[in-house]
């Protein structure tokens, strides 16, 4: 994102695409310039606007961590004109990037605490950023638990990373799907129900969750049942963004703007916002 014109994107090249699920595709993008990738800085949880020239732009979280600078990774669920056009792009295609935008996960204040990450479907994208960042700085954090769920095994993004997450000794990973599926060897059940069965302790812990709105709603209720306080729960709001810099007003909730004051909010902050979600 250029300093003189915040609406003007930088140019980048897609160096790899990954078909995550039937409707989610991941793009790995390298920005122009010999040293630009090394100079580009962002925080876990920040987002960017991807531009498809002649079609438009849309907001997606940067789901590669700032500790790994080979490329910027964005995962896109096909849902409208821009995302459908994005899904038609391949390796070597040019793309515009306005980033970084928004706030980020408060990883500094999370140091020394146990971390619970609860993701559903494409909601694993921002959580992946935080997870990999914490694994790359593993000594800064206590116990790390991951609960990741989807409707079916075929709806799980980042499936190529799951074996490593399951095998790691410094990460406790639980996978779940909504209904039984042939060959599935992990948990079966809705994410909030599995979370209650896991019964993580809220003592000296922070819970971070992201997923479909209905999943977040019941996950928040489950976390409250488990004893997590509002200020111990963090989530993200992303889909309302348009301009990304607090000018268009599309993402305002009361006096707050998701693109500037978010996308990361504590449950304590969300409860203080007007009921416009």
Image (spheres, grey):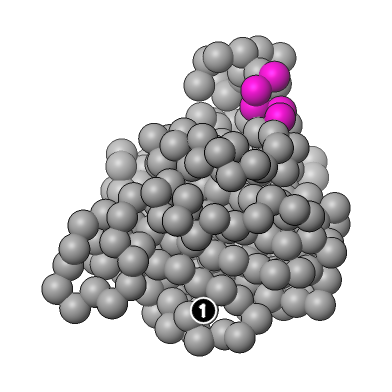
Residue lying farthest to the left in this orientation: 182
Kindly identify the residue that appears in the image at 59 percent across and 57 percent down. Answer: 200
Q: Along the line of sight, which residue is nearer the eye, 66 or 84? A: 66
Main SS, magenta region, reads helix
- Eyeballing the image, is 253 above or below 80? above
Task: Magenta stretch: give its range.
Answer: 268-272
Kindly identify the residue that appears in the image at 46 percent across and 34 percent down. Answer: 217
Q: Position of residue 116 (x, y in %)?
A: 62, 58
Local SS, label 1: helix
Q: Is residue 157 left or right of residue 247?
A: left
> Quarter-wise, where is residue 235 in the image?
top right
- Eyeballing the image, is 276 above or below 12? above
- Eyeballing the image, is 24 above or below 262? below
- Eyeballing the image, is 19 above or below 101? below
Q: Which residue is mark 1?
A: 165
Q: Is residue 1 on the magenta stretch? A: no
Kindly identify the residue that appears in the image at 70 percent across and 19 percent down. Answer: 272
Q: Position of residue 11 (x, y in %)?
A: 59, 59
Q: Position of residue 155 (x, y in %)?
A: 28, 60
Query: How many numbered marks does the figure carry?
Result: 1
Q: Is residue 102 left or right of residue 155?
A: right
Q: Dot 1: few (<14), some (14–19), or many (≥20) neighbours within 10 Å?
A: some
- Res 242 seen here: yes
> Quarter-wise, where is residue 181 in the image?
bottom left
Q: Along the line of sight, which residue is nearer the eye, 63 or 99? A: 63
Kindly identify the residue that appears in the image at 83 percent across and 71 percent down. Answer: 140
- Res 89 seen here: no
């Amino acid at each position: 994102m250029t300093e003189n014109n915040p609406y003007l994107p930088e140019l980048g090249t897609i160096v790899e695409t990954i078909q995550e699920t039937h409707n989610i595709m991941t793009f790995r993008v390298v920005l122009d310039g010999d040293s630009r990738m090394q100079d580009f800085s962002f925080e876990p949880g920040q987002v960017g606007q991807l531009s498809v020239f002649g079609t438009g732009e849309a907001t997606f979280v940067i789901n590669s961590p700032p500790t790994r600078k080979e490329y910027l990774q964005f995962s896109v669920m096909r849902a409208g004109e821009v995302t459908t056009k994005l899904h038609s792009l391949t390796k070597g295609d040019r793309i515009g990037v306005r980033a970084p935008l928004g706030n980020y996960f408060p990883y500094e204040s999370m140091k020394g605490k146990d971390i619970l990450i609860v993701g559903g479907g494409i909601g694993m994208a921002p959580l992946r950023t935080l997870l990999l960042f914490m694994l790359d700085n593993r000594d800064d954090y206590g116990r790390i638990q991951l609960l990741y769920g989807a409707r079916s095994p075929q709806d799980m993004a980042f499936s190529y990373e799951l074996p490593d997450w399951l095998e790691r000794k410094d990460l406790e990973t639980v996978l779940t799907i909504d209904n039984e599926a042939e060959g599935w060897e992990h948990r079966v059940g809705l994410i909030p129900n599995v979370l209650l069965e896991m019964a993580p302790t809220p003592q000296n812990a922070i819970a971070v969750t992201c997923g479909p709105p209905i999943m977040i709603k019941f996950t928040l209720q489950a976390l409250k049942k488990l004893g997590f306080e509002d200020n111990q729960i963090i989530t993200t709001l992303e889909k309302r963004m348009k301009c990304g810099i607090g000018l268009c007003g599309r993402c305002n909730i009361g006096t707050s703007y998701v693109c500037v004051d978010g996308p990361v909010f504590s449950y304590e902050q969300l409860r203080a916002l007007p009921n416009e979600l």
